Amino acid sequence: MKLILMMLVTLFIGSCICSISQAQTFTVQKYSIGGEGGTDYLTAEPGTGRVFVSRGSHVMVLDGNTGKILGDIKETPNNHGIALAAKYNHGFITNRGDSTVTMFDLTTLAVIKKIKIPAGGQDGIMYDDFSDRIILTNHSSTGTATAIEPNTGVITGEAQLEDNSPEGAASDGKGKLFVNLERKNKIQVIDSKTMKVTGLLPLDACEGPTGIAYDRSSDRIFSGCSKMSAVVDPVAGKVVATIPNGEGVDALGWDPSEKLLYIPAGRDSTVTIVHEDSPDRYSVIASVTTMTGAKTISVDPVNHVAYLFQPQYGAPSPDAPLDRNGRKPRGPVTGAFLIVIKH
């Protein structure tokens, strides 16, 4: 009898936790920012409210609470991502235009140095606390991941990947890095200390994986794809759950203490918000409207706020040539907006 009562109490507590998570409401606020340039990734600085936003040839630093422009880091041609190493008060920007990484001071925003990346094709970037390195993924001829020492800016290693279109990277905090391979629909596994490739994980039913996040408490990888994202158990080496979402995903946001996963879909102008009920069970608790094209996201895990950034484009010139996909290019930037999701 005592055992049965304990089981009933456990079930009741579990159902309460689930109902609380599903009862959360989310608000969306937009700040008109302006400025020139498109965008790719953005990075929220934990706890400070600052948001670093790529703008093509410069990086804007915004106050996420007000939309105020706090600073601008210039001469970052065809930039894509920003990583922060608070331990050293350094930030890093990937610049595909001149095959460099800009290293800057987090306090003054002054450029410290430009780091030449021989592989070229700079795209995603992140800080791995386990190996104490900056990790960047490069769309080079063979696809590479490069490690940089965050205090000195010295390159300390490079991994040759099995796909020339690597996307986001995530760390398990125990010595492994996981990189989405967009064309192969797999996840590359890398030893973060040696920068040696150690394996591949399948991504069944997940086409064109881009955004990635890792839940260290449950040892689960979240891999973002259009229409359907995947949850992977890296120990078992298999997909354990799938999550429906919109089209046009290019990054994921993960709030570990809230157990909330944010999946932005640029084509559908939505963010699907998912609660991790257990390592292999996930509930979609909200879908919020953002803006067309808003496909990347960053979460401040201290303040529990998610940010997106999206320019607004005018009509292209009638005589503009078609791109390689047979489509008209974007028109000029007519506005730009910081999108803030709170709960």
Image: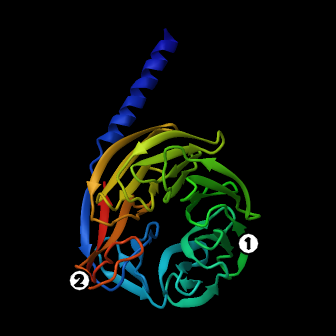
Q: Which mark is residue 147?
A: none
In the rendered view, tell whether residue 280 sits above or below residue 320.
above
In terms of image quadrants, where is residue 219? top right
Q: Amino acid at mark 1?
A: Gly
Please state, as top left, top right, bottom left or bottom right, where the C terminus lies in the image.
bottom left
Residue 258 screen position, x and y as percent: 43, 49
Task: Report the colour scheme.
Answer: rainbow
Classify mark 1: helix, strand or loop. strand
In screen coordinates, is 151 left or right of 26?
right
* Residue receiving disc 1: 157
Q: Residue at x 30, y 56 (%)?
A: 270
Residue 143 screen position, x and y as percent: 63, 68
Q: Residue at x 30, y 80 (%)?
A: 68
Q: Please tell me which residue lies in front, 125 or 159.
A: 159
Q: Please tell me which residue lies in front, 202 or 73.
A: 202
Label 2, label 1: how many angstroms apart (C-alpha)? Answer: 47 Å
Q: Judge whether residue 233 can be spotted in this image.
A: yes
In the rendered view, tell whether residue 254 sits above or below residue 157.
above
Dot 2 or dot 1: first in sequence order is 1
In terms of image quadrants, where is residue 48? bottom left
* Residue receiving disc 2: 318
Classify mark 2: helix, strand or loop. loop
